[in-house]
Amino acid sequence: MLVALGDLGVRLLTGDGRERARWDVPADQVVMADHGGCALLLVHGEGLVDIHRLDLATRRVRHWATMRLGPVLPTDRGVARGPAVAEASNLVVDVPGTGGTRAWRTSGKVV
């Protein structure tokens, strides 16, 4: 289980609660990729979300982006979603495993 502990960082725990790995990157939300090989570590600040990408195979973390986002929803597709600046749109960010980023915005009310 991957657990975000705020300023204490992120921990990978075994089923019985023992610490298997730790990363000292602050995170208050984890968004897992559907394949389970990587996760986005998010820190929500004043109007900004700081995002790190954790590769679980190599156990490396790198800063990925800082974005102005509303709430970010968990996903089963390796995509972070959240209402963008305007209430009537969604911002979708795709984080491919080999680098590169695709982002697009959809219009319509978020339900």
Image: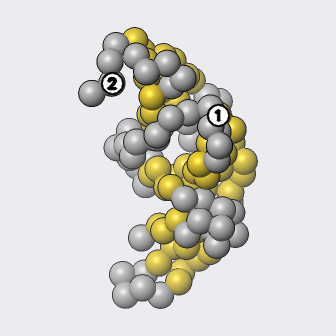
| Residue 77 rendering spot, x and y as whole percentages | 38, 39
Q: Secondary structure at mark 1?
A: strand
| Residue located 42% across and 70% down the image | 1
> Furthest residue to the top?
107
| Residue located 50% across and 55% down the image | 29
Q: Secondary structure at mark 2?
A: loop
Position above or below: 56 against 77: below
The label on residue 67 is 1
| Residue 61 rendering spot, x and y as whole percentages | 68, 57
Q: Residues within 10 Å of mark 2 (few under 14, many from 20)?
A: few
In this orientation, which residue lies closer to the viewer: 3 or 110?
110
> Furthest residue to the front?
46
Q: Is residue 51 visible?
A: no
Task: Give residue 79's quadrant in the image.
Answer: top left
Task: Give residue 24's quadrant in the image.
Answer: bottom right
Position above or below: 24 against 33: below
Task: Give residue 107's quadrant in the image.
Answer: top left
| Residue located 54% across and 81% down the image | 20
- Type of the residue with mark 2: Val
Contact (CB < 8 A) between labels 2 and 1? no
Q: Which residue is mark 2?
A: 110
| Residue 63 rendering spot, x and y as whole percentages | 72, 48
Position above or below: 101 against 108: below
- Type of the residue with mark 1: Met
